[in-house]
């Protein structure tokens, strides 16, 4: 999957990022959210700049992740010019920006290497996003962002892995039929 993402032409990547942003920003969940958490995409991921710009232009609070002592936390940013390159080469908020707790009415766009239609998410292996969110009963809405080919039949899912509520691709949104969860046994 990583090789396939890396082989995409820049123009195809940009077109997919623009389509994902149009779809994501038209969702009722986006319209309702006061705060939207997202991320600055790496070169092999769906570009998220259009989503970030839309959140900032709408007057909503934009939260971006940063890695602090192996823990992913989210901080509000007023603009993208103040970001610094952090762990793994990802642009993130300055350490002087206060970390904020995510709430159930927040919308969070999350990256992934692959997703399945049941909400399974395969990340890069660090588990940072899996541990970043409150228990399932208090979790914000999680939407994966991916190229359409990253939506596969099944990804490996362990007991500590967080599921997403949907996946936004350049072709649309795939909603996940997540059954009721027992937060003591399944964190996401």
Image: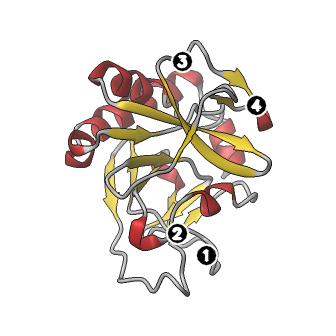
Mark 4 residue element? loop
Q: For the point 43% across and 48% down, which residue is it?
A: 108
Crowding around mark 2 (Cα neighbors within 10 Å: few <14, some 14 to 19, many 20+) is many
Mark closest to the chain's N terminus, 2 or 3: 3
Residue matched to label 3: 80
Percent across and percent down for residue 65 are 60, 40
Locate residue 8 relative to residue 137 in the image: left or right: right
In this rendering, does residue 118 appear at all? no
Percent across and percent down for residue 127 are 70, 61
Q: CA distance from mark 1 to mark 2?
A: 6 Å
Q: CA distance from mark 1 to mark 4?
A: 28 Å
Q: Depth-wise, is mark 1 or mark 3 nearer the camera?
A: 3
Crowding around mark 1 (Cα neighbors within 10 Å: few <14, some 14 to 19, many 20+) is some
Give me the disc on residue 86.
4
Q: CA distance from mark 2 to mark 4?
A: 27 Å
Mark 3 residue element? loop
Q: CA distance from mark 2 to mark 3?
A: 30 Å
Mark 1 residue element? loop
Asked if the residue under mark 2 is in contact with the one under mark 1, i.e. CB atoms within 8 Å, the reply is yes
Mark closest to the chain's N terminus, 1 or 4: 4
Residue matched to label 1: 157
Residue matched to label 2: 120
């Amino acid at each position: 999957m990583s090789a396939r993402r890396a082989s995409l032409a820049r123009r195809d990547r940009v077109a997919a990022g623009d389509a994902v942003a149009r779809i994501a920003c038209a969702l009722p969940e986006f319209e309702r959210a006061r705060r939207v958490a997202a991320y600055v995409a790496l070169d092999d991921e769906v570009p998220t700049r259009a989503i970030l710009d839309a959140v900032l232009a709408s007057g909503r609070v934009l939260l971006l992740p940063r890695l602090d002592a192996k823990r992913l936390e989210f901080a509000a940013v007023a603009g993208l010019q103040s970001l610094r390159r952090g762990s793994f080469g990802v642009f993130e908020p300055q350490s002087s920006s206060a970390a904020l707790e995510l709430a159930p009415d927040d919308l969070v766009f999350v990256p992934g290497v692959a997703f399945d239609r049941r909400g399974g998410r395969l990340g890069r292996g660090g588990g940072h996003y899996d541990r970043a969110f409150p228990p399932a009963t208090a979790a914000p809405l999680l939407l994966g962002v991916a190229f359409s080919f990253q939506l596969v039949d099944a990804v490996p899912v362990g007991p500590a892995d967080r599921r997403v509520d949907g996946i936004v691709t350049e072709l649309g949104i795939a909603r996940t039929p997540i059954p009721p969860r027992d937060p003591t046994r399944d964190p996401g």
